[in-house]
Structure formats: C-alpha cells, structure tokens
Image (spheres, rainbow, N blue to C red):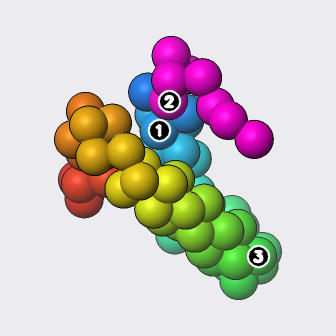
Amino acid sequence: MEIDETWLATLFCALGDAIKYNDGLRNSQTIRDAEEVEEWMLQIFQFKEYLREQLVLTPDKLEKYRQYFEER
C-alpha cells in the first residue's frame, strides 16, 4: 500500500492529536480502565514508528517530515 504524500502531514498531525488526547484521557479521573487506553496508545506509537521506518527508505521525505517525529 502506498500513501499519497499529500496526506502524510495530515496523518502525522492526526497521530499526534490522538496521542495527546489519549494521554489526557489515560490520566483523567473518569476513565475506568487506563490499561485499555495505554494499549491503544502503544498501537498508535507503533504505527507512528512504522511510518518513520518507511520514510527512512526515502531520506528526502524523512527530512521533510522529521518535525512530526520529534517529541513535544
């Protein structure tokens, strides 16, 4: 499967937002099972790492999207 490059920035932003949202949810008092949220976050992180590994194969794209892999 190939992802059109025009969608990559949107995909990375969505992943970042998902991580931020779920981290807040995991730490909230309203969540019943923090483990489920942590498991979901692990999958998101693994997917983000997979995308980074795929971009390593094309160094120009990796450099272009490097900002999305930096910790904030």
Q: Amino acid at mark 1?
A: Phe
Magenta segment range? 1-8
Residue 65 visible: no
Q: Amino acid at mark 2?
A: Leu
- Residue 36 lies in quadrant: bottom right
Q: Percent from the top left, x then y, of residue 45?
A: 53, 65
Residue 49 visible: yes
Q: Residues within 10 Å of mark 1 (few under 14, many from 20)?
A: some
Point out which mark residue 8 bears. 2
Point out which mark residue 36 bears. 3
> Going by the picture, which residue comes out furthest to the bottom?
35
- Kindly identify which residue carries mark 1: 12
- The residue at 64%/31% (across/down) is 3
**Total labels drawn:** 3
Q: Amino acid at mark 3?
A: Glu
Disc 1 versus disc 2: distance between alpha carbons? 6 Å
Q: Percent from the top left, x then y, of residue 27?
A: 52, 69
Q: Secondary structure at mark 3?
A: helix
